[in-house]
Amino acid sequence: MSTASDLETLLFGRRSVRAYLDRPVPRQTLERLARAARSAPSGANLQPGSLHILTGAALTALSDNITAVAASGAPMADEYTYFPKPMPAHLKTRQREAGYALYSALGIDRRDLEGRRDQFLRNYRFFDAPVGIVVTIDRDMGSGCFMDLGMFLMAFLMAAHDAGLGATGIGALANYGPEVAAHLDLPADQMVVCGIAVGYADPDHPANTVRTTREPLDVFTRFYGFD
């Protein structure tokens, strides 16, 4: 019987972490993770994507700003399409199941609209992680460069997991990308793609007990020419 490799163990062990210990992450560690992530494949070696890494007062200021904007009901940006429009029924079911699993773990009832809203707003506080990262991409990059950016981000998440850190991507940050860019005084050619929360996972927090399922192999894979 074959056993899982170290890489497979890392891949299957990684999860989205939405609650963190009050413990700082050294800059040297984050520099090491960023360098490792940049080794990801890149078509024509264009290396798309930039990381804007914040902690301490800088992170608090950004979080306070964007949380206030989101809570005010300000219109969301639509600089790129994340989800299908319209969302197919089978994908909508998958999305709802993931959301219900998180809310259930946190004791938030389906009818508790205020509780669900407050939990969603925690995206803009980077789930109170000690480190928040804003991910941007040059607007002139082609659509295919988002594939390279995805590999870059996955490499960062895996490097963080390997270093004993927890992390989660925050796609919701792009909802207020222009406000994030203005706060950080980013160049006009940079588009906010997502955020990443990074820190040491709180092992006792119910949010970190949630596990989402993945499709079985025979659903998403076809083999040709094999016996």
Image (tube, helix red, strand yellow):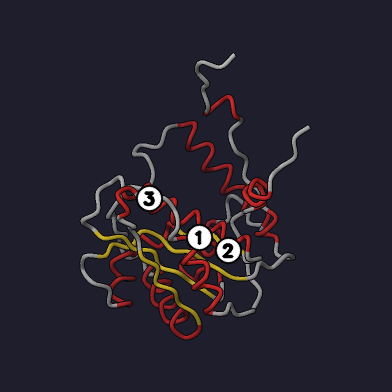
Where does residue 164 sit, x and y in percent of width and height?
A: 66, 65
Q: Earlier in the sequence, mark 1 or mark 3?
A: 3
> Which amino acid lies under the numbered mark 3 shown in the image of this protein?
Asp
Query: For mark 1, what is the residue?
Result: 156
Up-down: is 104 above or below 93?
below
- Badge 3 element: helix
Where does residue 215 sit, x and y in percent of width and height?
A: 58, 33
In the visual, does 17 lie left or right of 69?
Answer: right
Up-down: is 72 above or below 10?
below
Q: Residues within 10 Å of mark 1 (few under 14, many from 20)?
A: many
Picture disc at residue 148: 3
Q: Residue at x 59, y 13 (%)?
A: 227
Where does residue 51 sit, x and y in percent of width and height?
A: 40, 68
Q: Residue at x 41, y 77 (%)?
A: 62
> Which amino acid lies under the numbered mark 2 shown in the image of this protein?
Ala
> Which amino acid lies under the numbered mark 1 shown in the image of this protein?
Phe
